[in-house]
Image (cartoon, rainbow, N blue to C red):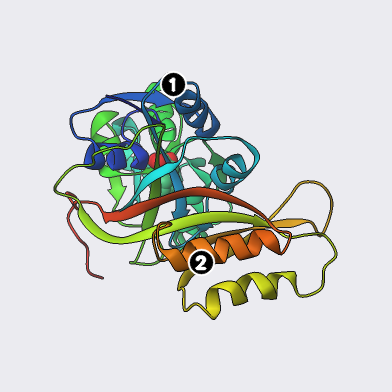
Amino acid sequence: MRVGYLGPKATFTDIAVQNTFPDAERIAYTTIPDCLNAVKCREVDVAIVPFENALEGTVHLTIDYLYHEINPPIRAEVIVPIQQHLMVHPLQTNNWTEVEKILSHPHALAQCHQFLHQQFRGVTLEQFTSTAAAAKYISEHPELKLAAIANEMAAEKYHLQIVKENIHDYHFNHTRFIVLAHEDVKVNKELKPLYQKTTIMVTLPSDRAGALHQVLSAFAWRQINLSKIESRPLKTGLGHYFFMIDINHEMQNQLVKNALEEIEVLGCKVKVLGSYSSYNAVNHEKEVVS
Ligand SMILES: O=C(O)C(=O)Cc1ccccc1
């Protein structure tokens, strides 16, 4: 099986793939849309992309792409613990406090905001397509005074020196990764299943007072638990939004089916992204208790 992921090797997404499909052939892509396109046109069998981080919230690129494009369904989600470390090229180990730029994925930079503010105020932060892309760049530029924020596997893979461990601002730092595929997938048996979920995107009829209230009521009176609701711009004008809703039940549940039908009858557009199991990744990295 071929699995496309946000690369290069040793991103957090790569860790998610290794956890979920240990025997798969892993194909790295530079951007999230590239991964999603690859599975859409069957260049790979499965794509895994980051969806939401516990500290930073939704990965907007993923959610927007899922709304605006036709994609294969979400078949599973995997929750992976995230530990961010500061690393430099071994030649820069002795003067790592004097780095001129810190490179990483925007979510990783944001997860370490307090650390960066306290220890590296005024130092330029440069966004890269992934944490491992930043680490790789540093390995290719030993002469530059740079640091990257990435994981332990990236430090090993790109022969960098970790100079400060666990620099993320809050201990509870986890990311949800979603698995998209045309066919059903079998995940690693070692993964711990947590619960069933259904993710939908709802566009309300324009200019109808109380439309969102009606949508939420359709779930509320049926006692259907929702674990998340988030609005995103429709990109058609200021004040135009769609809503992403996570339902804590599978789609086959009769009450969920009825609620979705009712919402559609009310004039809302519903797009079901998938009905799937949520799993906890196997934690191979050491847990840190601060
Ligand atoms: O850049 C990576 O390594 C990714 O896989 C995306 C990401 C970035 C920060 C936290 C979780 C996932």
Q: Residue 203 in the image: x percent, y percent?
A: 70, 56
Q: Which amino acid, by three-letter code, is at mark 1? A: Arg
Cβ(mark 2) to ligand 1 < 8 Å?
A: no
Residue 83 at least partly seen: no
> Residue 228 in the image: x percent, y percent?
51, 66
What residue would you read off at disc 2? 228
Image position, residue 63 (x, y; %): 57, 47
From this viewpoint, is residue 223 visible? Answer: yes
Q: Which residue is mark 1?
A: 42
The residue lying toward the viewer, choosing from 190 and 50, is 190
Judge left or right: residue 236 versus residue 116. right
Query: Quick check: 156 left or right of 237?
Result: left
Give residue 135's quadrant in the image: top left
Q: Residues within 10 Å of mark 1 (few under 14, many from 20)?
A: some
| Vertical arrangement, residue 137 with respect to residue 13, above or below | above
Where is residue 24 shown, x and y percent of the image?
23, 27
Label 1 SS: loop
Residue shown at the point (32%, 55%) measured from the top left: 278
Identify the disc placed on residue 69.
none
Measure how far apart labels 1 and 2 are at the Cα level.
30 Å
Q: Quadrant of ligand 1?
A: top left
Q: Residue at x 55, y 66 (%)?
A: 259
Q: Type of residue at label 2?
A: Lys
